[in-house]
Amino acid sequence: MITDSYQRYGALSRFFHWTMALLILHQFFRFTERIGNGEHWLARLSGTWHVSLGLLILVLAILRLLWALNQFEYRPRYPRTTQTAVRIGHGLLYLCMLLMPFTGIMYMLSKGHGLYFFDVELIAKSKQGVSALSGIGNLHTPIAWCFLGLVTGHVLLALYHQFIMKDGTLKRMA
Ligand code: HEM
Ligand code: HEM
C-alpha cells in the first residue's frame, strides 16, 4: 500500500526514507576530504556530485515533509512514554535534511561559486561572492557533524529496538 498505516510505513514513505538515507550517507563521505589533503580514495566517492545531489536532497526533503504531515494521523504509534522523544528526534532529522542544503547554497553564493544542478547552471559564478552570506554558509560543517551524530544515534536506536527489544521496529520501515 502506498499510504502509511498504524502497523507500518507505506511504499512512498519507505521510498523517501531509503533513497534519502543512501543519498545522505553519500554526502557524509565529503568528510573524508580531511584525510591526506583530500587525496584519499574515499574522498572521490562524494567529490563531483556533492552540490547536485545536495540540491536533490533538498527537493526530496520538502516533498517528504509534506507527505509526512499528510500521513501524520495514520503513521505507526509509539508508547506514550517515548512518543515525545521520538517526535523530537525525527523532527531534528528533518531539520538537518533542510538546513544542510540551505547552508550549502549559502556557502556557494558567499564564495561566488554560483550554483549548478549537474550540467544546468542555476546561478552564475561571480568574482566577489556575497560576503554577508558567509556566516550562514560556515554553519554547513558544524551542522553536518550534528547531523552525523543524530543519524548514528537513530540507526543504533533502530537496531537496539529490532534486535534487543525485538519489537519489530525495523520491519515497519523495511
Ligand atoms: C543533506 C545534504 C548535505 C550534506 C549531508 C552535506 C555534507 C557535507 C559534509 C560532511 C561536508 C564536509 C565538511 C568538512 O569536512 O568540513 C560538506 C562540505 C561542503 N558542502 Fe555539503 N552537504 C550537503 C549538501 C550540500 C549542498 C546542497 C551544497 C551546495 C549547494 C553543499 C556544498 C558544500 C561545500 C561547498 C562544501 C565544502 C566546504 C568547505 O570546503 O569548507 N553541500 N558537506
Ligand atoms: C541518513 C540516514 C537516515 C535518516 C536521515 C533517517 C531519517 C528517518 C526519519 C525522519 C524517520 C521518521 C519516519 C519518516 O518521516 O520518514 C525514520 C524512521 C526510521 N528509520 Fe531512519 N533515517 C536514516 C537511516 C536509517 C537507517 C540506516 C536505518 C536502519 C537501521 C533506519 C531505520 C529507521 C526505522 C526502523 C524507522 C521507523 C522508526 C519507527 O517506526 O519508529 N534509518 N528515519
Image: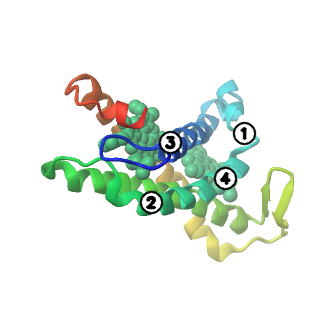
Q: Residues within 10 Å of mark 2 (few under 14, many from 20)?
A: some
Q: Residue furthest left?
A: 81
Indicate whether 32 appears above or below 16: above
Q: Which of marks 3 and 1 precedes in the sequence? A: 3
Look at label 2 and name its amino acid: Leu
Q: Amino acid at mark 4?
A: Leu
List the residue tagged with mark 2: 95
Q: Which mark is residue 117?
A: none
Residue 56: give its label: 4
- Sooner in the amino-acid sequence: mark 3 or mark 4: 3
Which numbered tag is attached to residue 11? 3
Q: Nearer the viewer, mark 2 or mark 4?
A: 4
Kindly report which numbered mark, 3 or 4, lies closer to the viewer in this rendering. 3
Q: CA distance from mark 1 to mark 4?
A: 16 Å
Give how far across and how far down residue 112 sits, in percent: 77, 66
Residue at the (32%, 59%) spot, across then down: 73
Kindly identify the amino acid type of the residue bearing the numbered disc 1.
Gly
Q: Residue furthest bottom?
A: 132
Left or right of 154: which side holds 129? right
Which of the two marks, 1 or 3, is nearer to us in this view? 3
Disc 1 marks which residue? 47
Helix, strand or loop at mark 1? loop
- Tag 1 or tag 2, which sits nearer the N-term? 1
With respect to residue 156, does 56 lie above or below? below
Question: Mark 3 packing: few (<14 Cα in 10 Å), some, or many (20+)?
Answer: some
CA gap between label 2 and label 4 equals 16 Å
Q: Is residue 96 left or right of residue 169?
A: right
